[in-house]
Amino acid sequence: MPVITLYWDELERMVGVDRNTILKKLPMLGCDIERIADDHLDVEFFPNRPDLYSVEGVARALRGFLDIEFGYRDYKVNEGNWKIYVDESVLSVRPRITGCIVRNIHVNEELLRSIIQIQEDLHWTIGRNRRKMAIGIHDLNRVNFPLHYTAVDENFSFVPLDFDRDMSVKEILEAHPKGQEYGFILENSEKYPMIIDAKDEVISFPPVINAEKTRVREGTSGLFIDVTGFDENVDKALRILTAMFADRGGVIESVEIIYPDRVERTPDMTPEKMNVSKREIFSLLGFTLNDDELRLALGRMRYGFEIGDDEVTVTIPPYRADVMHPWDVIEDIAIGYGYDRIAARYPQTPGVGREHEWNNLKDIVKEIMIGLGFTEVITFTLTNERTMYEYMNRTARPWDDYTPVMHPLTEEHTVLRTHILPKLIELLRHNKHEAMPQRIFEVGDVVVNTKNRLSLAACVTHSRANFAEIRSVVQAVMHELDIEWEAQESDDRAFIKGRRADIIVRGKKVGVFGELHPEVLERFEITMPVVGFELELSKLFNTGILI
């Protein structure tokens, strides 16, 4: 989770209270104070509140929570005469771009520090390490509008940030520190996104590096912000940045984005509204609040509100990227009311907790795999049909074999995983530039036909990985679990024919292992041989007891 450094001098000035009050109230907003120093404190926030990744956002939240400011703030955006033309060539590479202008802003050391911090934290969280979204912040006085967002080939050159000479795109990806760090995002691309101004000078090569020409320095008085990516995360990030600079006193102007088939104007700071049932509020909280208490709680959390007889209509601040469901609002009501005011009480249905039997089995399996030289990883349970089946040369039917997600927010998370092995291979793809060999495993839940099952999977990759190596690993695992087994010929098309086998226990298939098929490796963009296995522990054990 992001750890934000907040400097006492600017935080106390922006909030208007002393540090003792801040230290007392800050954890109530849902954060952990990691370190307190004479000139700063380090605070860890949950990833669901990216609007708190800057001193401006934290100060805004504290001013509401401490009743210094109350309720919803309307962020004014003046209509600007700034244009960005989007070329059709970039739509298949990185199709979305938004932007805004910030005037009457004085960039000093503390603002520059805040810009760098929130930019990197948003890249890491909302941007998924710049894959989904990347931000560029530029000196407005060095940018010549209108801009063109286009795609270029690898021989195109410009002067990147921190350099004093022209470098081609190819050279930047190979030699520039940021190119080496983020070049994987554009791997195998034939075209590369580029933002070029009216004088045919580059201002940004997203998501890798800005141009040296538009570097922001102390004393800069105007900013142009671009955000590029693929989906609504682009808009979320821009709204957070817009609120941040507006809180600093900046005057915001919109930018017209001209696509081949449509025109957009950004940023859109129009708030969304949501109706929340009072009955649901009181049911989830476990106690009732009168209308005045609801007003106070919502106002402290910077919502607008209209309180009716049966429901509350809230106006959601545009920088709140995390409010997607009435329960998100109810959680904020609890925070605004004060967790410290909620009396502790025993539950009406008492019970005694104990460790689940599966956890004991997991610990045993983890110890075995670590003893065999493997490193444990944890991947997401949410995935997609492409990774789980198409890339693996496998087929499956919704509901019969796997559980789809209704109304998925992204195309990457559309189903619950039925196997762990594809997720491990996907992880190898992201780490293929790291040292070899790589030996990873995961033990966790899969969901088959809407039912949770426990599975163990492992992968090995290096230049000489082969069937014999992974068979010896399976043999060692089964020996340590004291299970007799045999290998039979498999028809799993994820593996190479003749170098694959099913794991059979008491006549029943409980797993598979072998060398991954070249077609599978090609789809995952892996050049090294990969061997792996997956073992369905829930077919072998019933609540931790061998069947």
Image: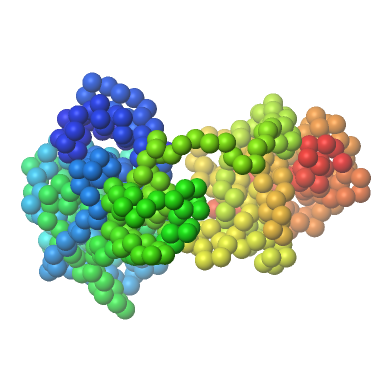
- What's the coloring here? rainbow
Q: Residue, x 47% and y 59% (percent of image)?
A: 279
* Residue 118 visible (yes or no): no
Q: Is residue 130 left or right of residue 110?
A: right
In the visual, does 525 lie left or right of 222? right
Measuring from the top left, give residue 520's x and y in whole percent: 63, 56
Residue 90 visible in image: yes
Left or right: 438, with 412 as reference point: right
Examine the rendered structure and indicate whether residue 412 appears above or below residue 508: below
Instruction: Return the residue nearer the eye: 11 or 467.
Output: 11
Displayed quadrant of residue 267: bottom left
Task: For the C terminus, give its image quadrant.
Answer: top right
Question: At 12% across and 56% down in the image, what residue appears?
Answer: 251
Q: Residue, x 56% and y 65% (percent of image)?
A: 406
Residue 407 location (% of width, % of height): 52, 66
Q: Residue furthest right?
A: 506
Which residue is drawn at the image coordinates 77% and 43% (left, top)? 537
The x and y percentages for residue 365 are 72, 33
Foreground pick, 372 / 385:
385
Q: Quadrant of the N terminus?
A: top left
